[in-house]
Image (spheres, rainbow, N blue to C red):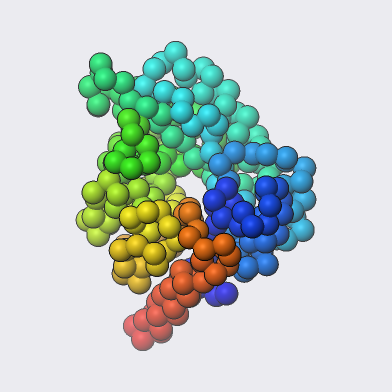
Amino acid sequence: MTGRSLSVNLEYMFQEAGDDLAARVRAAAAAGFDKAEIFWTHDLDALSAALEDTGVRLWTVLVDPRTTRLVLPETHGQFLEDVRRTVADAVRLGCPHVVVGSGPAVPYLKRPVQIGIMTEAVAQAATIAADAHVTLLVEAVNTRMDHPGVLTSQTSDSVAVVRGVDSPSVRVLYDLYHSVVEGEDPETVLPEVVDLVGHVQIADAPGRGQPGTGSIDWAAAFSLFDRVGYRGSVGIECYPTVPSTPDALAFIQKIAASQEAQESNDHAHR
């Protein structure tokens, strides 16, 4: 399918193909997707073979464990080891992006202090990423539903870290679902920070189902991505509400394709 490139999270989707991520890669390819995302690396040999056989590109992987409290300096040594391991796996799998989470906040330090301590850790990790030609993506996730107590819960938090590090190897992962659930207005938030955004992820809200199951206007959302100048892929990270993942994602594939067609038509008439 033509249109804006979509990537799919294989932890949540294509579960009907079985527990093996390599099988899910093949199922995603059969459904027309050329990019995939995972949380952490599994059987590298099988995954690498599936990616090579299908032409699917692994687009993001997380630094594991994601629950490391980066507000505690004593965790930074282990965090950097985890980054080295994950970056090495990403390079082996041809994956250009590694996602970094903040872990939980602590109640006894002011928020700017905690963001500053996290920034110090990510700045050290940026050197590892730069040497491997990999980009770190700092993600904010909502505290209201999915990640109570997490430090980076607002887009401004991840932006503060990225600006503090000030490296082209560290970008913002803007998750529209988390942003909306946390009470943000994407029309207000995204235009101000799009120059720092390295990747976008989506799911519908409420419920984190596939686009089309909640209250988000997806035609407007994709129009927003275009208007603010975001040209990258959009990752779908949702819980399908029907057994067939291709059926669940058909709606957003059509939206992405129609938005791209409209964009091309607009450019042709300028």
Residue 255 sits above or below residue 120 on the image? below
Q: Position of residue 32 (x, y in %)?
A: 62, 69
Q: In the image, is 58 to the left or to the right of 198?
A: right
Front-most of residues 126 and 174: 174
Residue 188 can be seen, yes or no = yes
Q: Residue furthest bottom?
A: 269
* x 44%, y 50%: residue: 198
Total residue callouts: 0
Residue 134 can be seen, yes or no = no
Q: Position of residue 184 (x, y in %)?
A: 24, 50
Q: In the image, is 19 to the left or to the right of 219?
A: right
* x 44%, y 78%: residue: 258
- The quarter of the rendered structure image containing the C terminus is bottom left
- The quarter of the rendered structure image containing the N terminus is bottom right
Question: Which of the 4 image quarters holds residue 227?
Answer: bottom left
Q: Residue furthest top?
A: 74
Q: In the image, is 204 to the left or to the right of 91?
A: left
Q: Position of residue 130 (x, y in %)?
A: 54, 36
Q: In the image, is 108 to the left or to the right of 35?
A: left
Residue 218 sits above or below residue 23 on the image? below
Q: Position of residue 19 (x, y in %)?
A: 67, 47
Front-most of residues 229 and 83: 83
Question: Which of the 4 image quarters holds residue 36?
Answer: bottom right
Front-most of residues 34 and 208: 208
* x 71%, y 51%: residue: 22
* x 31%, y 68%: residue: 217
